[in-house]
Each structure stands twice: as C-alpha cells, then as structure tokens.
Amino acid sequence: VVHVKDVFRANRTGYIVEEYVVPPAGAAYADLASRVGQMGPLLAEELLPLMKPVIRDLAAAHRAGVLHRELKASHFLLDERGALRLTFYFQADTLCAPQYGPEPDFAPNFVPPEVRHGGGWSPCGEVYSLCATVYECLTGLTHREAWHKWSEMCGGFPAPGKLGLLPHWQDQIIMKGLDTQEDKRWRTMEDLY
C-alpha cells in the first residue's frame, strides 16, 4: 500500500498527500491498467504472485475496519522493484460508517452488483472488485466487456481458464470472487487468499 503522508482540508476540499512511487526503470507505464494497455494482458505467472501481498494488505485494512471502495487496475502502481502498491484511498470508508446520501461515482466495471443496486460496501464486495481487476489484467477486457463480447456465443463471459489463461483450480477461485450473488462469493480477502 502507498503510504499516506498527510490528510488535510483547505478551500472546502479534502486532500491526501501520498508518497511518490518510483516506477520501474525504463518502463513506459506506472500502473497495471497502463501496463495491460501498452503490452497486453499479463500472464498468470506474472500477475498472481504480485497480487498476494496486496491481498494480505487489504485483509489487514479490512480487519482495521477500512474499505478501499475503488479497486481497479489503474490504482495498482508498479514500483521500482516491480512490486504492486495500492493507491487512491480517496474513496476509502470505514466498515462502521453510516451510509449518507448517494455514493460517489465509481468505475462500474469494478463495483459489486450489491453496491450498483443500492447496497453498501463490504469486504466481500472488495473481493469482487479485486477479482474483476485480476480478470481484466489476465484477459485485457473487463468482465463486463467480455460479457458483451461473448454473451451470445457462450451465455456470459468466459472464465480465464476456458481461454487457457489459468489452471482450473485458480480459475475457480477468480470466478467465485466474481459471482454476482454475494452469498456465493468469497466473504473476505483471507478466504480468497
């Protein structure tokens, strides 16, 4: 996770000052979305080891009562060592915070169905967002883009394993995280890990 250096308000606006993350030397990209956009999808052997520390960090944040609420590829920075650093905690909230008024505009491809339909965020919803991010990084398409592209042919979006991108057991993990029914999804990041 990118370290937050300061949080303050000025001119009726909130500000978060984060540490500067040095990108990989010579890379023309600094985040996962740019990496996928410029060089194509990542191989599972590249992506999944990068995600393990992120999952552990998110699990720790959830145990502390903090939800990110905007997990997507452009918020995962690659640092000079090639490790992922999660940034953009601007939409973060606590698990015990009451939900007042409309939610901010979130990237719809990564928002869990229960939030899109008026429900609140939870660790289970963040599992959905993370699995949607993994899907995009492995296929080059968001799962919703894949749904539109392949729904007539195969009745929905294909699992990465059906595209030859993951072994069956890893495929089942990601697809369970993308289940549209919250009660069938992994409940926590620990469950996903």
Image (tube, grey):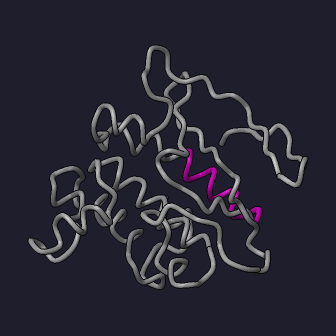
Quadrant of the image occupied by residue 174: bottom left
For the residue pair 45 and 95, the one nearer the viewer reads as 95
Q: Tell me which segment is drawn in magenta.
A: 53-65
Image coords of residue 64 (percent x, y): 76, 62
For the residue pair 136 and 171, the one nearer the viewer reads as 136
* Residue lying furthest top: 26
- The residue drawn where x is 41% and y is 60% is 132
Whether residue 175 sits left or right of residue 161 in the image: it is right
For the residue pair 77 and 62, the one nearer the viewer reads as 77
* Residue lying furthest front: 11
Image coords of residue 176 (percent x, y): 37, 71
- The residue drawn where x is 50% and y is 68% is 111
Quadrant of the image occupied by residue 32: top left
Image coords of residue 146 (percent x, y): 24, 62
* Residue lying furthest left: 153
Quadrant of the image occupied by residue 161: bottom left
The quarter of the rendered structure image containing the N terminus is: top right
Answer whether residue 170 is magenta in the image.
Answer: no
Image coords of residue 125 (percent x, y): 54, 71
- The residue drawn where x is 24% and y is 57% is 160
Whether residue 19 sits left or right of residue 127 in the image: it is right
Majority secondary structure of magenta residues: helix
Please give the count of numbered marks on the rendered protein. Answer: 0
